[in-house]
Amino acid sequence: MQLEANYGYIALLLIVAIIFAASLIIIPFILSRLGIIPRKPDPVKTSTYECGMETVGKSWVQFNFRYYFYALLFVLFDIETVFLYPWAVHFKQLKLFGLVEMFIFIFVLAIGFVYAWRKGALEWK
Amino acid sequence: MNGWDWIHWLIFVVVILGFALSMIIVFIWTERKVIGRFQLRRGPNRVGPMGVLQAFADFIKVLTKEDIVPAKADRWVHLLAPIVAFVPALLVLAVVPFRDGSILADLNIGILYVVAIGALGVVGIFMAGWGSNNKYSLISAMRTAAQVVSYEVPVVLSIVGVILITGSLSMVTIVHEQQVPFILLQPLGFLIFFLGTTAEINRSPFDLLEAESEIVAGFHIEYSGMKFALFYLGEYAHAVAASAVITTLFLSGWKGPVLPPVLWFLIKVGFVFWLFLWMRSTLPRLRVDQLMGFAWKFLLPLALFNVFLTGAEVLLWEEKMASWGNFPWPFLFLNLALAGGLIVLWSKFFRLGGGRVEV
């Protein structure tokens, strides 16, 4: 019971937090409708990067490939840590068996990590 | 939920909002004042005594500023991004104990929740960068995503060290288990967590997403008025949340002699924030290839080593040396020495690329 209630508290806090953040955006919106905040858009003002160079070409382009390797490595190591958390909680019951077992698991991953390092996947190039 | 539960909830929502907002205002003022002093300036000193009302003056200014939305922007993404960036910081505070029993929700997976929710702020930043339809913003958004993804791994691994000692994910239990602050038992874990968190909340020297000298202001370049202020508040709210989490995990939360627990908690949170400021004013900003290299080649191997070191020590203590006393003092000194030695050794072996690099 207490556990579900805890998640209920957090869900309600989420609603309060969203209302709080949204009100900070809605209040200026209302004030601008009332004429307290100026609202005079014009083509130059609403152009992209108003006071600087004009943008050449589209902004929504396919993006650099180098970010992809980091995402792959992240998936690998994040799944590893997902396994580490329950292991860490029950470590005192698992004793030496747990330590050796996890060492083997991490060792396999570490081989992959060293391979990626050697291949230069960690270099920004 | 019965009546008492509702009252409990109401009190703690008010406490969390009040804590977050007042700490944000205090932190903004402290940051400007302290950074000013570090740079041999005075900082704000016109509005109110010692400039304490500067934040309120800025608030009024920013509230009455025109809200400009670029014509080419994705309007809805542009509108929702500040909210998405701000809300997770408040949610993290839900599981932070202010003193014994003073907590909104003592989840049994508290620290896992912090890891999961804390990283959500980056979604807001990415939305801002993408929705603005500006190339600088997009570069900034991509960098943030890569940066948070990279630093998430060492951060999460450094927490495992703490969990191995406590055997629990609950924030309250973690504080109860700390006979001495875990910063002494886990010096390496603390350093990795601190540096990784600095990167995750995008504070200098890891604030590449708003590197003024290269991508002007990054993701909030097309924002003005209250939407911009919400990003600014969100950045500080994340700093408050990160300081509170570090206090709970490594500085034994509310515990301390003489003074009341809540005061100890506030002092420790302030101290952690001061460490952020100290680092910001001491170190220059990293370059993007150095940033990624630091996470993957420096922090990650050290974090993995820390997990096994802690595991072996916990095992040794529980099995062999439990009769020596209540507290593993030998490991305390061993860990401090090992942390210092490893950092020196690893930094000798490992060099971040210098010179000119095409990034």
Image: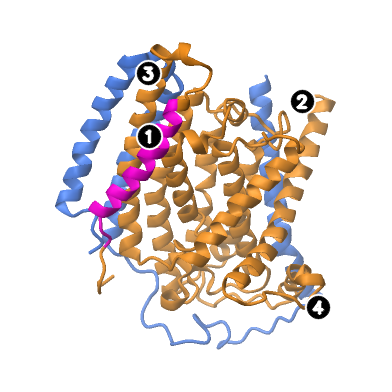
Instruction: Check the picture and name the quadrant holding the N terminus of chain B.
Output: top right
Q: Residue at 33%, 42% (x, y): give it.
A: B302
Q: Which residue is mark 4?
A: A36
- Chain ID for blue: A
Q: Residues within 10 Å of mark 4 (few under 14, many from 20)?
A: some
Q: Is residue B265 magenta?
A: no
Marks 2 and 1: CB-CB under 8 Å?
no
- Per the model, the C-alpha gap separating discs 2 and 1 is 35 Å
- Per the model, the C-alpha gap separating discs 1 and 3 is 23 Å
Q: Residue at 47%, 28% (x, y): give it.
A: B163
Whether marks 4 and 1 lie on the same chain = yes
User: Which secondary structure class fits the magenta region best?
Assistant: helix
Q: Which residue is mark 3?
A: B316
- Per the model, the C-alpha gap separating discs 4 and 3 is 69 Å
Q: Amino acid at mark 1?
A: Thr
Q: Is residue B337 magenta?
A: yes
Q: Is residue A30 visible?
A: no
Q: Is residue B316 visible?
A: yes
Chain B drawing hue: orange
Judged left or right of residue A118, residue B163 is right
Residue B130: mark: none
Quick one: B216 or B172, which is closer to the camera? Answer: B172
Q: Which residue is mark 2?
A: B1
Q: Which residue is mark 1?
A: A81
Q: Residue at 70%, 51% (x, y): give it.
A: B20
> Where residue B309 appears, x then y in whole percent?
35, 30
Marks 4 and 1: CB-CB under 8 Å?
no
In the image, residue B303 above or below residue B275: above
